[in-house]
Amino acid sequence: MSANLIKIISAAIIGVALGILYGWVIDPVQFTNLTPNLLREDYRADYVLMVAEAYHGEINADLAARRLGVLSSEAPAILVAQTLAYAQANQFTQTETNLLQELLSAMQIYQPQNSANP
Amino acid sequence: MKRPASRNLTLYLALALLAGLGAGLAYSWLISPVTYTDANPALLRADFKDQYRTVIAAAYAATRDLPSARARLQLLGDADPIGELSAQAQRMLAAGEPFENVQPLAQLAADLQQGFASIQTAKPPLTEIIQTPSAEVPVIETLPLTETPLAEETPVESTLAFEQTPLIPQNPLITSTPRPTVTAKPVIGQPFTLVGQDTVCDTSLKQGLLQVILMDNRRKQVSGMEITLTWNQGEDHFFTGFKPELGNGYADFIMQAETIYSVRIVEGGSFVPNITAPTCTAPDGSSYLGGLLLTFQQS
């Protein structure tokens, strides 16, 4: 009887393993409505670079900060600093690095309008 | 023939296997599904895709790097990137966003359509205010990116043109200053030409909505331009600028189904025949009358 019980438990374990294999590898859940914080690092870096390029033309720190806020809840300056480090480690061009540096400088002194001095 | 005990064991084994399979699936699909940490932009939610497009267009407005903008748009996985840009621009206009916010999207869509970057409008990124002892008002020196601003809209006394503008302002006096608003006026005698004709399938807009945008040769919208619309049963006249919340050069008209219209810009002589309201397909598969966006620009 105990041998049969072992067989049944073994069958259940095999079933669980097959189920997990199917659900994680063969047919995992497909997400289609993701938020930007889940973007791969290179896409995040490119997004921040786009914000930097736009900032260079617009010189609007508030707008740049709001755009960066879409990507992460981190402080904009931290986000740009991380991207700058990524850019320097991944052979971004000097122009791109300069643009990120420019945005970083702006974000380091940026004060949200809501928390402006009364 | 198997004994009943053996048949029961087989049954129990099968049931245990199925129960385990079900538990495994429940765990892997519901309790602990695969989490995405390295997603690509195509998987973003629609509103974030809109934001992504907006930033692409804003970056393009600054760099005029059309190949980069095109490559970035492809990341979003849109079947028709130009159409998506136009549709988003229309949604933003319909939502009451100022044309200045929408213009980069429309500009990028137009440039993608024509296949090359249009001439950059003069938009100095840095404005330096220098106090001079001889003048009560500060002299504004404008440092353009790559080109000298056009003379008629340059409110400066002196212009310094550098080959390359320093990326990081070093002078603590440097500050961003809003540019004076310039009311665009059409260049008399220059014809308007059709630079964009886009189908707009957006259920949030009125059916059969014909939208017309007129811009001068610097891509600034011009108001007060008369547009004549003719069809086999009548004619109507309307003017740009009556809905400034949608842009100074904006005008619209509701088209009827299966009616062929001709659009003429009275001053400038541009004539566009055979305009009809397109048929669009809603997400539920039903058909409805779509709209058109006609963009004219002075050459």
Image (spheres, coloured by chain):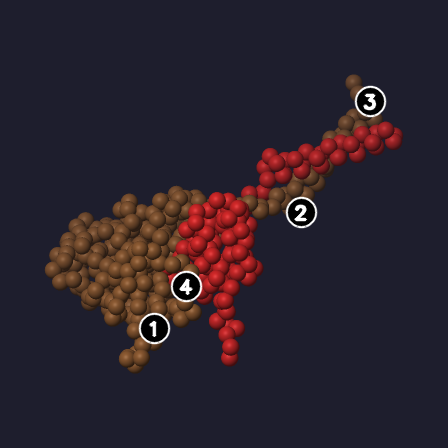
Chain colours: A red, B brown
In this rendering, the answer to whether B287 lies above or below B265 is: above
Find the distance from the CA under tag 1 to the CA under tag 3.
102 Å
Question: Which amino acid type is shown beneath numbered disc 3?
Answer: Arg
Q: Are marks 1 and 4 in contact (CB under 8 Å)?
A: no
Find the distance from the CA under tag 4 to the CA under tag 3.
90 Å
> Residue sitting at 47 percent across and 57 percent down?
A101
Q: Disc 1 marks which residue?
A: B130
Q: Position of residue B199 (x, y in %)?
A: 30, 50
Question: Which amino acid type is shown beneath numbered disc 2?
Answer: Ile
Q: Position of residue A32 (x, y in %)?
A: 51, 47
Q: Disc 3 marks which residue?
A: B3
Mark 4 or 3: in front is: 4
Q: Earlier in the sequence, mark 4 or mark 2?
A: 2
Q: Earlier in the sequence, mark 3 or mark 2?
A: 3
In this rendering, the answer to whether A60 lies above or below B260 is: below
**Chain containing the residue with disc 1:** B
Question: Which amino acid type is shown beneath numbered disc 1?
Answer: Ile
> Residue sitting at 55 percent across and 43 percent down?
A30
> Residue sitting at 59 percent across and 37 percent down?
A27
Q: Secondary structure at mark 3?
A: loop
Q: Earlier in the sequence, mark 4 or mark 3?
A: 3
Q: Disc 2 marks which residue?
A: B31
Find the distance from the CA under tag 4 to the CA under tag 2.
52 Å
Q: Nearer the viewer, residue A97 or A68?
A: A97
Q: Secondary structure at mark 1?
A: strand
Q: Position of residue B121 (x, y in %)?
A: 28, 58
